[in-house]
Image: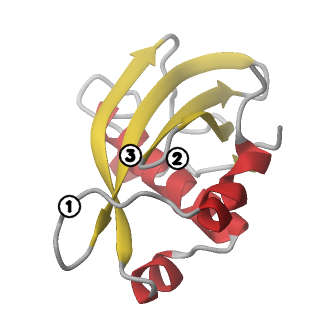
Amino acid sequence: MKKIIYSPEIYTYNIDFAGHVSNIIYIQWMEIGRLKLLDQIGLSVHEIAEIGITPILVSTEIRYRKPLYLGDKVNAEVWISELSHATAVMKFRFLKNENDIAAEGIQKGLFINIESKKPHRLTPDQRNLFLGFLEDT
């Protein structure tokens, strides 16, 4: 199984009143990871829209373990833990200074037809694009 690994930056405007990275920033970092995943498999947002489908989020869950502060180095990982005909569950891990888990997250996405707004069943070829990032079970 491959993972997408990226290193989001912490900026001063990411810091909340408590002095650490705001909770909402993790959701933004998850979006970056999802887009990188789609790019990596060859279905960027523009390419996937051209075939008439789009992914939407069904749920997001984040477990915060250690706060991140300005100056910390962040490494993020995303991979797919479950893949059905119309949904994908993505897992995220945010590492603080390379080895401490700062947060872990899960998002469930649903593929829909852009025009009908109804669920879209991935074709076998579309589904196969995701398999390299699917967690070994």
Q: CA distance from mark 3 to mark 2?
A: 26 Å
Q: In the visual, does 49 lie left or right of 42?
A: left
Q: Position of residue 11 (x, y in %)?
A: 47, 52
Q: Is residue 68 visible?
A: yes
Amino acid type of disc 1?
A: Lys
Q: Residue at x 70, y 16 (%)?
A: 100
Q: Residue drawn 36% across and 81% down? A: 52
Front-lying residue, 96 or 39: 39
- Residue underneath mark 1: 118
Under circle 3, the secondary element is: strand
Quadrant of the frame with the N terminus:
top right
Q: Which residue is mark 3?
A: 109
The residue under label 2 is which amino acid type?
Ile
36 in relation to 137, above or below: below
Foreground tag (3 vs 2)? 3
Lower position in the chain sequence, tag 1 or tag 3:
3
User: In the shown orientation, is residue 62 left or right of residue 77?
Assistant: left
> Residue 112: x, y in percent?
30, 62
Reading the image, the residue beneath label 2 is: 10
- Against 32, is 95 above or below? above
Does any portion of residue 4 appear in the rendered image?
Answer: no
Say if mark 3 contacts mark 2, CB within 8 Å: no
For mark 1, give the secondary structure.
loop
Q: Secondary structure at mark 2?
A: loop
Number of residues whose C-alpha sits closer than 10 Å to that of mark 2, classed few (under 14), some (14–19) or many (20 or more): some
First along the sequence among labels 3 and 2:
2
Figure check: 103 above or below 45: above
Tell me: residue 126, above or below residue 63.
below
